[in-house]
Each structure stands twice: as structure tokens, then as C-alpha cells.
Amino acid sequence: MAQMIPGAFAYFNGAYVPTEDAKVSIMTHALNYGTGLFEGIRGYYVQEANNILIFRLKEHVDRMVRNFNVLCMEVPEDAAKIEEICVEVVRKSGFREGVYIRPMCYKSELSLGPKLRGVESSFCCYIIKLGDYCDIESGLDIAVSSWRRLSDNAIPSRVKATGSYLNSSLAATDAKQSGFDEAIFLREDGTVAEGSAMNLFMVMNGKLITPPPTADILVGITRNTIIELAREELGLEVIERPIGRTELYVCDELFFSGTGAQVAPIRSVDRRVIGSGMPGPISKKLQDVYFNVVQGRLPKYRAWCTPVY
Ligand code: PMP
């Protein structure tokens, strides 16, 4: 999993610096109030090309820049510059393996008071080496969390805000303490939202079903990728609609999607075995297509992959 890596470069205060030199004050607004937003982007190392391909860089940066408006953020770096920085931190670090890129905008002023307007924001970016974030082979054991997903009128899930990950941490910690791999959040209305850092898909009678963007979810780039690949490559019908808790117990297949989670099949929910208890055929097919796409092996989707070197 993630670790501090010697040799890694970060972008901080307008310059590329060794990551260990990129430090903020304890008075930083974002540290005190959770007033930051970030992205998580994967770069896949492709052996035959001896290159790293960054997956859907444009879409990640676009989501970030759109969300500036929610947190009243103004930073000097525009989308094109942020994309350039994401590539440059990897290039400068010189890595030739899987990486996770973390661009972040945060209220960097050393000022007191939870407010968004009139507080200076800064942009920074760091990288880590990252393999699989969770098991993607044998299927995960999941629990429905007793913690509810943040609602759009509390802390909007569509914004990848630093502060909202307290909600994710509560659910993931409880699940892991109880011997599960991950948690599924319900919304305040009792319908299904997502995992702690991943979106959820259900297969029922050959159709792919996932909660809509209004269901207090982060509208995942991987989610959007899976929807497109399911329709285009597998010819599946994809339905975005609310999902009830017990549908999770009676469906044919379940899996998570996310930059970290990639495509991670689920084998049980609340100790109820899903389907055969093994990753289902549709989950596996989508996983296969996904890994071919992120490694640039399907020319049709090559534009989603940005080479670093
Ligand atoms: N939901 C949450 C809460 C997340 O943190 C993530 C990870 N970014 C996702 C869903 C999946 O989003 P993406 O596919 O864009 O990584």
C-alpha cells in the first residue's frame, strides 16, 4: 500500500520539490476545517511500452476544476496547467511502476474561522507508488454500515472534499474492525449510496444497475468508464436508479468501481453470499475489459491514456 517514497517529487507553492520538503503549517485552514478538495488518479505502468499511462487525466481534472465552485476556490493553476503538473510530478520522479497521483486544492491561509469566501487557496500535487488498493481476485466481504452517507445538503459527496473523508473513515473503520473488507453506505432515506471510496454496481438478470448521480455519491470516473464499457463492449443495458438494501442480498453479482478499487468483485454482504460466492461472469468480463483499456490495449479508448514519458 501507500508509503513515503524516496525520490518522489511533489508540486508545492509553485515549484517542483522533493516530497519530504512539501510541508504546511499547523495553522493551515484546510488542516483545521477540512476545506480542501482533491483527485486520485492512477498511472499504469505498461511493460511492453516501458511507459506509464495516466488514466482519464482530463476527466479527473475537469471534475476537480468544476468543484472549485462549490468550495469557492480560486487558484492560479488552470485545468491545462494542472494536467501538466500531474504528468510532470511522475516524470520528474522517474518511476517505472504503477503510481497514484494526488492533485489537491486547499485553503492555505493561516486564518481562523470556518468560511469559504476570502480565504486564499493553493494547489499542490504529490504521487505515491500504488498496486492494488483492495483484493480484486477472490471477492470482498462487505457490511452495510450503520453510518449514513453524507447528504448533498450537508457535505456534497459529488465534491471530493478532504473533510468528507471523515464520513468514509468512520464507515471503513467500523467494517474492518468487525472483520469485513469494506462498507456500503446507505443514504438518509435508506437507499444505497456507495462504498467508502468506491462506487457500487449490481447485476440483476443480466442488467447492470447503479445508483444515480443524485444518490449522494461521488460521480466516479471509473463508474462512468464502466457504464460506457458495459454498453459499448458488452452490449449490456445499464440502469441508473435507486437501489434498496435488500436488493444487495438477492442480486446476481455486485462489484465496486474506483480509481483505487479498480473493479473489485464482492462475494458477500452482511454475511449473505452473493450469487455463487465467486466473482460473477459479468464482473469478470468488465474487469478484463477495464484492465485492457487502462493499459492502452484497446485503440478505441487510447485517448483516455496519457503517456508520461
Ligand atoms: N466514491 C468515493 C467516496 C470515492 O472516494 C471514490 C474514489 N475517488 C469513488 C467513489 C470512485 O471515484 P473514481 O472512480 O473517480 O475514482
Image (cartoon, rainbow, N blue to C red):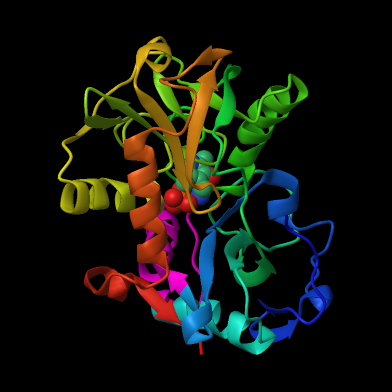
| Residue for point 36% across, 29% down | 215
User: Range of the magenta residues?
Assistant: 54-79
Q: Residue 160, can we see it?
A: no
Residue 67 in magenta stretch:
yes
Q: Compare residues 148 and 130 and report the one nearer the observer.
A: 130
Residue 101 in magenta stretch:
no
* Quarter occupied by the N terminus: bottom right
Q: Compare residues 302 and 174 and report the one nearer the observer.
A: 302
| Residue for point 38% across, 27% down | 253
Image location of residue 306, percent across then percent down: 41, 78
Quarter of the view holding residue 101: bottom right
Left or right: 109 as drawn, with respect to 148: right
| Residue for point 48% across, 29% down | 278
Quarter of the view holding residue 208: top left
Image location of residue 70, percent across then percent down: 43, 49
Give the vertical position of 274 relative to 126 (above or below): above
Image location of residue 24, percent across then percent down: 79, 66
Left or right: 193 as drawn, with respect to 208: right
Q: Residue 7, can we see it?
A: yes
Give the vertical position of 156 relative to 27 (above or below): above
Image location of residue 107, percent across then percent down: 63, 59
| Residue for point 33% across, 56% down | 289
